[in-house]
Amino acid sequence: MKWTGLLLILLGCSAAGISLDLGLLQSIDTLMDIRDMMHFLVHEIEDCIPFGEATKLAAAKSEGICAYFMQGVSQKLQMYEGEDIALIWRSQSEVFKPLLKNEDYEAFCHCLDQNGFVGCRDQCMVLNRYVEKLADRLAVMKKKREETGKLYRTLGVISGLFLCILFL
Amino acid sequence: MNSLLALIPEDLRMYFKKALSKAEDITEIRLRCNQPVCIYRMGREVFLLKNGEETEKLRNESDQIRRDLLIASKEYIDKVFMHICRYSPYAYEEDLKKGFFTVEGGHRIGVAGQARVAGGVVKGMQYIRYMNIRVAHQIKGCANAVINKLYLEDKTFANTLIIAPPGMGKTTLLRDIVRLVSNGNDKYMGMKVGLIDERSEIAGCYMGEAQNDVGIRTDILDGYPKLLGMENLLRSMSPQVIALDEITSDQEAELLVYMLRCGVRFIVTVHAADFEEILQKEILKPLFKERAFQRFVLIEPGYGINLKTDIEMKEQVSI
């Protein structure tokens, strides 16, 4: 019984460490999906396709939650009654809230705040600027994961062992 | 909700709802920065009031009506413009350089503002402060009276020139002729029509989809320059009839002459007040020389449609 309990403590602590690492990995994966989705969107806008259609086409090329997000934006734009597209984007962005860190979520929410440019180039420039920032952020997060991933897992196991010794 | 009211953002619709519920006779809606909103109903000018009613008279400034007029502010015009473009003005960049774009329903939005100039070249338009919503009206059947006279004895379509001064309904007539030629009738078989709609006026295409009925056998090249369009149609769509609006250059006339020798029939329009005036047009001379046209349709203000064959024209004036 005692050994079973200690084993459970050890497993629990290790799982907590792994979960912290996986949380970081999930954020990175989501940001990578967002980066791809934004590439698809920019590509459509470069062809001067209006937002409504561009989001629909980007949704078809995206996967998972990004496809769901773009579909949502596209559908809202189809039923469009005059609200600012930035507001539609922001309200729909909520689906990413549980998956992203707060600063990443805020940056994504506001990436379409600047809109209404008469030139395709200008509109693409704004979105590309976000994509560039995203790429920088991804690089930082990947590096952070390399550095801290092992640390979280090791700390999980060590704290488990520490608790086991303490209870013994 | 009609397609016209859909052009107005939801929070501004209360002002327009009543006026646009009777949209049949509306030809234009004018928004000018800091000026009253103006609606043209078949040439009659009315101004919109804040309570949604209309008034015909603009009295002096102290008048109550003047205070009740709905004024199109800068923000208001921005909002309508962005709503009409669905927050994608970049998608209309090229059209905006020409000063107009076509939206769902086939309505044409004319805009005016400040030129965006770089290196002495106009790159586009910014600060759009004046808008003209030109309401699309397809009058089906307006060509019924002439359509059967536009065919030759061998039941092929006659090359036709539609002549009228600006604003007399040339494009409306052309659109209906295209529809009727394309669909055919009991007497004449439907024909494959290639329509070059350079300014999206005839078919009123929105995202490539025709908003007006231009017939079941019509292929549309929307937004194409006429020269390139004619070449493309000829190569790719094997049209029996090519329709285009307003010949404006010598090259276009020359290409029409070339098409004559390819066995393609055509319908074109030209700005002129009467039959004599078209003979003065230099660009049409190569076509007259080749006796290209077999039917001349003149829309005369107050007199309606006057149709002449090439033989009748020859008797009247020496082509």
Image: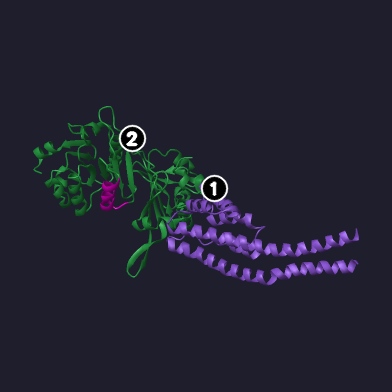
Chain colours: A purple, B green
Residue B249: x and y, percent? 21, 54
Image quadrant where residue B163 sits: top left
Q: Where is residue B224 in the image (x, y as percent from the top left)?
A: 31, 51
Q: In this view, does B197 lie above or below B112?
A: above
What amino acid is found at the position of numbered circle 2 in the picture? Answer: Lys
What's the residue at 72%, 71% (across, down)? A151
Q: Which residue is drawn at 73% across and 63% down?
A: A18
Q: Nearer the viewer, residue B248 or B304?
A: B248
Q: Element type at marker 1?
A: helix
- Which element carries disc 2, helix, strand or loop? loop
Residue B16 position in % (x across, y down): 47, 44
Camera-side residue: B40 or A154? Answer: A154
Q: Nearer the viewer, residue B263 or A127?
A: B263
**Left or right: A121, with B270 as reference point:** right
Q: Magenta segment, which residues?
A: B224-236
Amino acid, disc 1: Gln
Vertical side of B265 occupied by A156: above or below: below
Relative vertical location of residue A151 with respect to residue B313 in this rendering, above or below = below
Tell me which chain the residue with mark 2 is part of: B
Which of the 4 image quadrants contains residue B238? top left
User: What residue did someone put label 1 on?
Assistant: A75
Label 1 resides on the chain identified as A
What residue do we see at 36% from left, 64% from top?
Answer: B123
Instruction: Say the numbered circle drawn on residue B140.
Output: 2
Q: Distance between the residues labelled 2 and 1?
A: 34 Å
Q: Nearer the viewer, mark 2 or mark 1?
A: 1
Image x and y of residue B180, in percent: 29, 34
**Residue A125 colored in magenta in the image:** no
Q: In this view, does A131 lie to the left or right of B199?
A: right
Magenta stretch, overall SS = helix
